[in-house]
Image: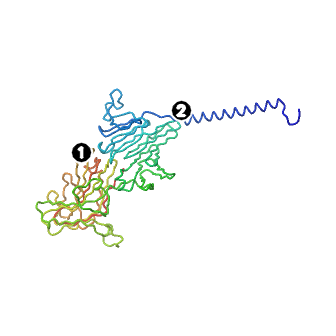
């Protein structure tokens, strides 16, 4: 055998070794492909259900349909909610659900997913609009579950099931313009896509709040984490604001920057966000001299340090004034449209600093005609067709020798020491009239009576979920 040449035996061994290595590598590769297929293959899971809590106002659009249709009760033999008040329809991936304002206040429909996750939809504003986009699980293993909802409009509450059979559970909500909200299982979350009018007024496009658990908003490789009890907002310019305490201020312009004269007709969008002044003669044929009540805004020391302060420490104070030793009562006030579904708020706290400097007729006189400071809320319980109700908080000057006024009807009376600042603090959810109210229409702040001088500052109406 010449040098440098392999013998036939060695050549055969080399060839066999190469084939063995190649076969081994092929088997390893095929095994890896099969393992990846086993662990990553996904399938769509059925079993979701749409529950409509009212007769009208919930629409469903299937993936291939061009229009939405109102949900209807199925025949008893296929009705998943037979003998229940809810109207139930099986839900498939790709279905789109909408709610209409006429449906009422509070949750009007629910999506119950296969893992018992509960997504409640509201109809406030212009209604809500959700696309049930993804519910995928691992085909042959308990490795992964992926759920995604496209939240196009309105308000919804997401209560994500805690005990999941999959190792990795990904729950996400996609918002318009590519914002994604990631939610941890076992948590409770709120997502609100504001209407254009509300968005322009607040300077906010989207709100994400966390009651329990934690969430993350992602956009353009940036993220903001939201812990339990916090709220984050996406501004009109696209910025995601760092999380803060989850509270909502229902009043606009609490510093009285823009008090307008009442017009004959004011639509909701114009009225919301502005204070409108009004007056009312409480006796017939009153002369212009008798109708001399005024509303003004003055700079004064804050109630916490009323005796001495610098000009920089002064606050804006709303003042109601009527003088001239009047003999008949007159009412002056300001009002603001709230138009707010408040069904999610477990606390609705009305607070203000108030004081009465002048009140010529003592106590509240006959039928509460004397009330130098009052806060009046108009509300409804469940449906837009419900009768509009009123709840009034009347504050008046009280001297030690006087007898307290007793609450009557829908009016609560609160006696104040004259000349002194008093901190009004009322949780409307603890009030017997407003405990179950789902909708606040309007707030009125007014003074009525003979001669009076009353002041108000730091007025707030704060909601908490």
Q: Residues within 10 Å of mark 1 (few under 14, many from 20)?
A: few
**Residue drawn at x 43%, y 53% as measured from the top left:** 234
Total tally of numbered discs in the picture: 2
Relative to 142, is 376 above or below?
Answer: below
Query: Does label 1 or label 2 sit earlier along the sequence?
Result: 2
Residue 194 circle label: none
Q: Secondary structure at mark 1?
A: loop
Residue 386 circle label: 1
| Outermost residue to the left | 285
Q: Residues within 10 Å of mark 2 (few under 14, many from 20)?
A: few
| Outermost residue to the top | 77
Comparing 196 with 353, the one in front is 196
Q: Secondary structure at mark 2?
A: loop
- Tell me the quadrant of the picture where the N terminus can be found: top right
**Residue drawn at x 68%, y 35% as measured from the top left:** 25
Q: Position of residue 281 (x, y in %)?
A: 15, 60
Q: How is the image coloured?
A: rainbow
Comparing 344 with 103, the one in front is 103
Q: Position of residue 463 (x, y in %)?
A: 34, 53
| Outermost residue to the front | 66
On the rendered structure, is 185 left or right of 450? Answer: right
Q: Position of residue 355 (x, y in %)?
A: 25, 65
Comparing 438 with 284, the one in front is 284
Comparing 379 with 161, the one in front is 379
On the rendered structure, is 16 left or right of 261? Answer: right
Which residue in the protein does label 2 denote?
140
Relative to 117, is 238 above or below?
Answer: below
- How far apart are the alpha carbons under marks 1 and 2? 53 Å
């Amino acid at each position: 055998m010449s040098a440098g040449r392999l013998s036939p035996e060695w050549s055969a061994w080399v060839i066999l070794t190469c084939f063995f290595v190649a076969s081994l590598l092929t088997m390893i590769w095929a095994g890896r492909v099969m393992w990846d297929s086993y662990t990553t293959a996904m399938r769509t899971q059925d079993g979701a259900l749409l529950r409509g809590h009212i007769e009208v106002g919930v629409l469903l659009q299937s993936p291939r349909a061009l229009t939405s249709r109102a949900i209807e009760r199925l025949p008893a033999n296929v009705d998943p909610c037979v003998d229940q008040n809810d109207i139930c329809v099986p839900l498939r991936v790709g279905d789109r659900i909408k709610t209409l304002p006429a449906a009422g206040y509070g949750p009007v429909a629910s999506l119950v997913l296969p893992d018992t996750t509960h997504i409640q939809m509201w109809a406030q504003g212009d209604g809500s609009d959700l696309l049930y986009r993804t519910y995928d699980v691992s085909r042959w293993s308990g490795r992964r579950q992926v759920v995604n909802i496209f939240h196009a409009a309105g308000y919804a509450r997401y209560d994500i099931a805690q005990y999941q059979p999959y190792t990795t559970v990904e729950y996400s909500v996609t918002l318009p313009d590519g914002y994604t909200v990631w939610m941890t299982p076992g948590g409770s979350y709120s997502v609100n896509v504001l209407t254009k009018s509300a968005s322009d007024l607040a300077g906010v496009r989207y709100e994400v709040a966390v009651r329990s658990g934690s969430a993350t908003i992602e956009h353009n490789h940036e993220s903001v984490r939201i812990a339990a009890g916090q709220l984050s907002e996406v501004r009109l310019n696209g910025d995601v604001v760092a999380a803060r305490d989850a509270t909502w201020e229902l009043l606009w312009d609490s510093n009285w920057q823009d008090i307008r004269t009442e017009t004959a007709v004011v639509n909701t969008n114009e009225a919301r966000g502005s204070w409108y002044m009004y007056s009312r003669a409480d006796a017939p044929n009153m002369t212009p001299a008798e109708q001399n009540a005024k509303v003004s805004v003055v700079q004064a020391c804050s109630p916490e340090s009323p005796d001495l302060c610098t000009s920089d420490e002064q606050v804006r104070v709303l003042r109601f004034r009527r003088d001239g030793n009047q003999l008949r009562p007159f009412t002056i006030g300001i009002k603001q449209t709230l138009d707010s579904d408040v069904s999610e708020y477990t606390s609705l706290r009305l607070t203000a600093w108030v004081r009465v400097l002048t009140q010529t007729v003592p106590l509240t006189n006959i039928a509460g005609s004397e009330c130098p400071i009052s806060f009046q809320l108009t509300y409804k319980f469940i449906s837009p067709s419900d009768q509009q109700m009123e709840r009034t908080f009347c504050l008046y000057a009280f001297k030690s020798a006087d007898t307290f006024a007793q609450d009557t009807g829908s009016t609560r009376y609160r006696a104040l020491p004259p000349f002194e600042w008093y901190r009004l603090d009322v949780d409307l959810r603890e009030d017997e009239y407003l405990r179950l109210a789902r909708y606040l229409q309007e707030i009125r702040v007014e003074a009525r009576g003979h001669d009076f001088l009353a002041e108000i500052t730091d007025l707030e109406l704060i909601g908490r979920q």
